[in-house]
Image (cartoon, helix red, strand yellow):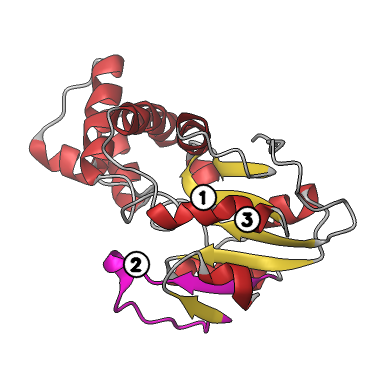
């Protein structure tokens, strides 16, 4: 986890207790999320490091992003600790994701340009289900210095189960920023639910990848662009 100090001198003082927090994938960074091929190749990396050879059926159990009963069964067949192998795979996944981003696979959405203006009114935070090292890379690589709190999830099983809609990392942000009120802007139903669980107002941003997504938990508002946050809230 990191706390960034924005260079903007017009940011709010410590008496402002309302914050605006953002998801990363699909909100700040273009695209719904990390390409599935990253996790697939990360599994190959982990298996190679352990010197493990697997048949097609066992590999199918290990494939995918989830830490679930199939993954545990695949590990049982190999006689390896599922928690340890999952952690190793995620470590490789984070490295591969960073390599792809460094190569320009995904860029920031154009409306991110409004963030400095928002930072003059509120403390801003970036809270993502993506790996912490990946979130840190995006912020540093693109020079986004407006966030006072930046946090992705930890690699491994504990971090996996703390993904939204679990409010764990949102509550961390609220505590770190000494906030009593605020918004969380996301692009998924799980973002809105996590916001509600953390005592925040959930705002859904509609992008091309979630244009028709329905919300079982109502958002406080739905927006088409981050620029709407300036005057609407």
**Dot 3: within a 10 Å radius of its alpha carbon, few (fewer than 14), some, or many (20 or more) residues?**
some
Quarter holding the N terminus? top right
> Viewer-proximal residue, 69 or 38?
38
Say which quarter of the image contains residue 20.
Answer: bottom right
> Viewer-proximal residue, 115 or 194?
115
Vertical comparison of 36 with 23: above or below: above
Give SS at disc 1.
strand
Residue position for label 1:
128
State the image coordinates of residue 188 (x, y, percent, origin top left).
42, 67
Q: What stretch is highlighted in magenta?
A: 200-220
Q: Which residue is drawn at 39% across and 32% down?
A: 94
Between marks 1 and 2 in the image, the one whose residue lies nearer the viewer: 2
Q: Residue at x 51, y 82 (%)?
A: 217
Whether 144 is among the magenta residues is no
Residue position for label 2:
207
> Viewer-proximal residue, 153 or 66?
153
Distance between the Cα atoms at labels 3 and 2? 21 Å
State the image coordinates of residue 80 (x, y, percent, origin top left).
35, 28
Q: Which mark is residue 86?
A: none
Quarter holding the C terminus? bottom right
Whether 211 is among the magenta residues is yes
30 left or right, relative to 111: left
State the image coordinates of residue 49 (x, y, percent, origin top left).
29, 16
Q: Does label 1 or label 2 sit earlier along the sequence?
A: 1
Q: Residue 117 carries which label?
A: 3
**Dot 1: within a 10 Å radius of its alpha carbon, few (fewer than 14), some, or many (20 or more) residues?**
many
Asked if residue 151 can be seen in this view, the reply is yes
Asked if residue 169 can be seen in this view, the reply is no
Vertical comparison of 49 with 31: above or below: above
Q: Does label 3 or label 2 sit earlier along the sequence?
A: 3
Give SS at disc 2.
loop
């Amino acid at each position: 986890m990191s706390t960034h100090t924005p260079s903007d001198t017009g940011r709010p003082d410590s008496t402002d207790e309302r914050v605006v927090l953002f998801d990363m994938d699909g909100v700040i960074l273009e695209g719904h999320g990390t390409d599935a091929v990253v996790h697939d190749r990360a599994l190959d990396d982990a298996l190679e490091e352990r010197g493990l050879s697997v048949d097609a059926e066992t590999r199918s159990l290990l494939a995918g992003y989830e830490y679930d009963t199939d993954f545990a069964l695949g590990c049982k067949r190999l006689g390896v600790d599922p928690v340890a192998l999952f952690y190793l795979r995620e470590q490789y996944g984070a490295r591969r994701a960073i390599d792809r981003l460094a190569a320009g696979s995904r860029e920031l959405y154009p409306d991110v340009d409004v963030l400095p203006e928002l930072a003059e009114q509120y403390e801003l935070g970036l809270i993502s289900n993506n790996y912490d090292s990946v979130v840190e890379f995006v912020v540093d690589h693109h020079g986004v210095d407006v966030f006072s709190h930046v946090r992705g999830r930890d690699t491994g099983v504990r971090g996996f189960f703390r993904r939204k809609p679990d409010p764990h990392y949102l509550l961390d942000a609220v505590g770190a920023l000494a906030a009593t009120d605020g918004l969380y802007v996301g692009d998924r139903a799980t973002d809105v639910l996590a916001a509600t669980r953390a005592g925040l107002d959930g705002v859904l941003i509609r992008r091309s990848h979630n244009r028709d997504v329905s919300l079982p938990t109502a958002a406080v508002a739905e927006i088409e662009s981050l620029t709407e946050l300036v005057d609407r809230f």
